[in-house]
Image: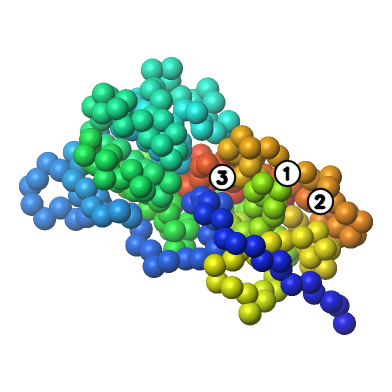
């Protein structure tokens, strides 16, 4: 009988990403624009941190969500963006941001003074800026378009549709969503036919964690490797994946999201991970231990462009 090595547990680390971490799915209502009950010129956006009244077609938008930016860029709306956290700009967006766009500060440390100076009419955040929500909301209507729940695609599509409705370009948005869904369907077909079992791991500071990545498992619907969990494990500890465990699991494909590389804190040592045991896995033998583009997968996602790129990356790996 095959011996399965249980996961090693370490204290939970408080890092997360809309696209990189989805290990638990709290009750989630997709972000949306509420039905208009009166003749008010303002639209009400129901979002993850409450609701906000926003004028249609805002022209001075501060974004902390790169997925929303790539959606706006794809829809021809990038001229309405006045600031982004430029220090964390993912490489796939390099060359796609106008030089006039100001730096909104860090992903977790918004430059409140600079943002106020820009006089925005809308600020879009994700969970990373949650602690700054109240201060940002004093400057301009602030909406949290974070994604979550057990249907990541529905959540992402809701955000994209929201942008289309906000700028009164529903038809163009629907066309772009149709093109995205065609890409997704193609990837799903390949995943179903290949039957390959995929292990996704998140690297942080030399440690590897199993990751229930929603694009891989919910959107593309790739088969997951069954990871044994110790029922006696403490709830506040996060499982740690070791090369020995990977050797026992023998995944067909290993996808690594390198958080450390995404935030400029070093890179995963792939060579050290590839022990004699790992070299016996199907993933190693077929050159399927793949490091995904770190900043795309950890800092972005959920947009027309980013989600399309992520889906194509998974399809290519299968």
Which residue is painted at 51% across and 66% down in the image? 24
Q: Which of marks 3 and 2 is nearer the N terminus?
A: 2
Question: Is 121 placed above or below 316 here?
Answer: above
In screen coordinates, is 246 left or right of 116? right
Name the mark on residue 273.
Answer: 2
Q: Residue 290: image x %, image y %? A: 74, 47
Q: Residue 254: image x %, image y %? A: 74, 55
Q: Is residue 175 visible?
A: no
Q: For the residues marked 2 and 1, what is the alpha-carbon distance in whole angstroms?
A: 9 Å
**Frontmost residue, 189 versus 263:** 263
Which residue is painted at 61% across and 53% down in the image? 186
Q: For the residues marked 3 and 2, what is the alpha-carbon distance in whole angstroms?
A: 21 Å
Question: Is 218 placed above or below 139 here?
Answer: below
- Residues at badges 3 and 2 in contact (C-beta under 8 Å)? no
From the image, tell me which residue sits under label 1. 268
Q: Residue 163: image x %, image y %? A: 33, 43
Which residue is painted at 43% across and 40% down in the image? 108
- Residues at badges 2 and 1 in contact (C-beta under 8 Å)? yes
Callout 3 secondary element: helix
Q: Which of marks 3 and 1 is nearer the N terminus?
A: 1
Callout 2 secondary element: helix
Callout 1 secondary element: loop
Q: Nearer the viewer, mark 3 or mark 1?
A: 1
Name the mark on residue 298.
Answer: 3
Quadrant housing residue 64: top left
**Frontmost residue, 148 versus 76:** 148
Name of the residue lying farthest toward the top? 99
């Amino acid at each position: 009988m095959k011996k399965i090595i249980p996961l090693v547990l370490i204290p939970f680390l408080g890092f997360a990403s809309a696209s990189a971490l989805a290990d638990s799915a709290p009750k989630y209502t997709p972000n949306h624009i509420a039905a208009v009950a009166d003749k008010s010129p303002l639209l009400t956006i129901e979002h993850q941190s409450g609701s906000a009244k926003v004028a249609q077609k805002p022209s001075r938008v501060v974004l902390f969500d790169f997925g929303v930016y790539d959606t706006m860029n794809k829809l021809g709306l990038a001229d309405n963006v006045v600031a982004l956290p430029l220090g964390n700009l993912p490489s796939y967006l390099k060359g796609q941001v106008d030089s006039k766009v100001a730096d909104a500060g860090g992903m977790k440390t918004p430059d409140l003074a600079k943002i106020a100076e820009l006089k925005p009419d809308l600020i879009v955040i994700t969970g990373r800026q949650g602690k700054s929500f109240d201060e940002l909301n004093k400057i301009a209507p602030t909406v949290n378009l974070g994604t979550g729940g057990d249907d990541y695609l529905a959540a992402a599509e809701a955000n994209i549709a929201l942008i289309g409705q906000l700028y009164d370009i529903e038809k163009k948005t629907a066309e772009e969503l149709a093109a995205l869904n065609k890409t997704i369907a193609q990837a799903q077909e390949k995943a179903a036919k290949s039957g390959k079992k995929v292990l996704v791991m998140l690297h942080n500071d030399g440690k590897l964690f199993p990751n229930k990545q929603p694009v891989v498992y919910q959107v593309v619907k790739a088969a997951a490797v069954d990871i044994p969990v110790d029922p006696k494990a403490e709830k506040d500890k996060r499982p740690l994946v070791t090369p020995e465990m990977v050797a026992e699991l023998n995944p067909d494909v290993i996808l690594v999201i390198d958080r450390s590389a995404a935030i400029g804190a070093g890179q995963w040592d792939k060579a050290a991970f590839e022990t004699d045991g790992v070299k016996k896995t199907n993933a190693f033998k077929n050159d399927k231990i793949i490091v995904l583009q770190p900043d795309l997968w950890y800092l972005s996602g959920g947009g027309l462009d980013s989600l399309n790129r992520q889906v194509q990356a998974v399809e290519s790996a299968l």
